[in-house]
Amino acid sequence: MKFRFAAILAAIAPLWAPSAWGADVAGRFDYYVLSLSWSPSWCATAGDARDAAQCDRGRKVDFVVHGLWPQYERGWPENCATAERDPSRRESQAMTDVMGSGGLAWYQWQKHGRCSGLSARRYYETIRDAAGLIAVPRVFDGLNRDVAVPPAVIEDAFIEANPDLTRDSITVMCDGERLQEVRICLTRGLKPRDCAPDSRRDCPRKSVLMEAVR
């Protein structure tokens, strides 16, 4: 009996292999996460060392799109194979006004955009559409001094500016003491929706630092 059971397990083992079950397929996902990065925090922790243009004084950059990520109800796909061509350098560079740099746009296409099932052009257009649907609270526009803000207050400000959002559809992330980004869950049609449980990871700090825009 034990021998027969072992033989059955051996026969069906290939069906459990990641290559058979776990391969991410372009276009097969449940919803999007729109990630909005607080530019002053990124500049302080990484951008200044790279001499990134979005960190130049006088640019007044606040929130930028970090990414638009296809998600499963549990987990997410990444680095999918796709028949769509990669974007040109010019197409990626054209996303600088929304994403801060063409290099970030290219990286996001490689890791996440290929999983959308969209062409590179349409994926970039969808990023613009998603960003355009979410109003950044005026209180953060042109922030001219460093402030410490409870994550819940940041959520409240976004919900006030975007009444279709709920606390379950927005997540505030921190990097140490700094505000890192705000993540907003959207349907495939770019309507606000509740995030799946594994995407609700609010910053546990009582307050986060929002450094002034430059």
Image (cartoon, rainbow, N blue to C red):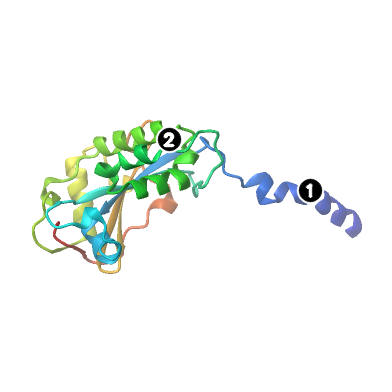
Residue 211 appears left or right of 188: left
Mark 1 secondary-structure assignment:
helix
Q: Amino acid at mark 1?
A: Ile
How far across and how far down the image is residue 58, in percent?
11, 54
Figure quadrant of the N terminus? bottom right
How far across and how far down the image is residue 89, in percent?
38, 41
Identify the residue at the far bottom of this view. Answer: 176
Residue at 18% over, 55% down: 153
Marks 1/2: CA distance?
38 Å
Q: Which mark is residue 67?
A: none
How far across and how far down the image is residue 118, in percent?
46, 32
Can residue 13 be seen here? The reply is yes
Residue 190 appears left or right of 109: left
Q: Amino acid at mark 2?
A: Ala
How far across and how far down the image is residue 196, in percent?
42, 47
Residue at 43% over, 39% down: 31
Can residue 190 be seen here? The reply is no
Mark 2 secondary-structure assignment:
helix
- Give the labeled residue for mark 2: 120
Residue 115 appears left or right of 177: right
